[in-house]
């Protein structure tokens, strides 16, 4: 079945450091890929998405590129802030379905 | 535009008691989802509705869980009787009807259940 694997956390960085959170997937066909973020005490919010190979999703300084050859969708940000501290979830939506399959989530902690 | 609204936000109950969660999706969204998120894990789908029809309930533990979506708008998820292992966050989400890839799914803030 479809699945998403994320790097384990927590990831602890200093403010202005470079961020990478790895995400790889297994799916039939070419799914759409998403990053959701969950701030403490809040619900899931869509951060960015990509619907086809080589697409780059971006939002709030975060970027991720859909890599079909490596079945990956790694999340990056050039300079993190304390306010980026949250849990980040990678997810896919299969072509034939209409639901999201999530990874386990990666906790990001940014220190000032 | 109002987002997905859920209630209650927090609920603490004793095991074997019943509990119900309510969800109001974004206006115009015909697809509604209930997900369960255990501590430290990603959300997992319990049930998906297209209008009032449950089209994917394969992961719903039907011995104790039930859901309904009368009139294809609001939905209720019920657990009876609750067990200690049901402690989790129950997330409601909605999306537009078209089941194409790339369809954005919007989540509510969740109902946090603790069974003691």
Image: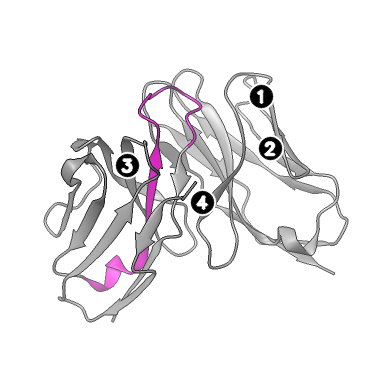
CB atoms of marks 2 and 1 within 8 Å: yes
CB atoms of marks 2 and 4 within 8 Å: no
- Please determine if labels 4 and 3 lie on a single subunit: no
**Residue B93 colored in magenta in the image:** yes
Counting other residues with Cα less than 10 Å from the Cα at mark 1, is it few (<14), some (14-19), or many (20 or more)? some
Chain ID at mark 2: A
**Residue A11 colored in magenta in the image:** no
- The residue lying toward the viewer, choosing from B110 and B7, is B7
Counting other residues with Cα less than 10 Å from the Cα at mark 2, is it few (<14), some (14-19), or many (20 or more)? some
- Please determine if labels 2 and 4 lie on a single subunit: yes
Q: For the C terminus of chain A, give its image quadrant.
A: bottom right
- The residue lying toward the viewer, choosing from B111 and B60, is B111
Please give the label number shown on residue B32.
3
Residue range of the region highlighted in magenta in the rendering: B83-104
Residue A10 versus residue B15 in the image, above or below = above
- Residue visible at 39% across and 46% down? B93
Residue A35 versus residue B85 in the image, above or below = above
The residue pinned by badge 2 equals A74
CB atoms of marks 4 and 3 within 8 Å: no
Q: Mark 4: which secondary structure? A: loop
The residue pinned by badge 4 equals A104
């Amino acid at each position: 079945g479809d699945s998403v694997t994320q790097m384990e956390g927590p990831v602890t960085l200093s403010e202005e450091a470079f961020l990478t959170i790895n995400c790889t997937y297994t799916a039939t066909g070419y799914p759409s890929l998403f990053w959701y973020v969950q701030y403490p005490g809040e619900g899931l919010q869509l951060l960015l998405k990509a619907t086809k190979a080589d697409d780059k999703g971006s939002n709030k300084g975060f970027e991720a590129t859909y890599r079909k050859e490596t079945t990956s969708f790694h999340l990056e940000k050039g300079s993190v802030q304390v306010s980026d501290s949250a849990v980040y979830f990678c997810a896919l939506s299969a072509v034939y379905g209409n639901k999201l399959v999530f990874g386990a989530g990666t906790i990001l902690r940014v220190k000032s | 535009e109002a987002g997905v609204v859920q209630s209650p936000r927090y609920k603490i109950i004793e095991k074997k008691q019943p509990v119900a969660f309510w969800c109001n999706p974004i206006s115009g969204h015909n697809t509604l989802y209930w997900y369960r998120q255990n501590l430290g894990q990603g959300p997992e789908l319990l049930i998906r509705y297209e209008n009032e029809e449950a089209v994917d309930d394969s992961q719903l533990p039907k011995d104790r869980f039930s859901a309904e979506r009368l009139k294809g708008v609001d939905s209720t998820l019920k657990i009876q009787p609750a067990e200690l292992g049901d402690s989790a966050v129950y997330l409601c989400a909605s999306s537009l009807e078209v089941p194409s890839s790339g369809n954005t799914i919007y989540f509510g803030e969740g109902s946090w259940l603790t069974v003691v």
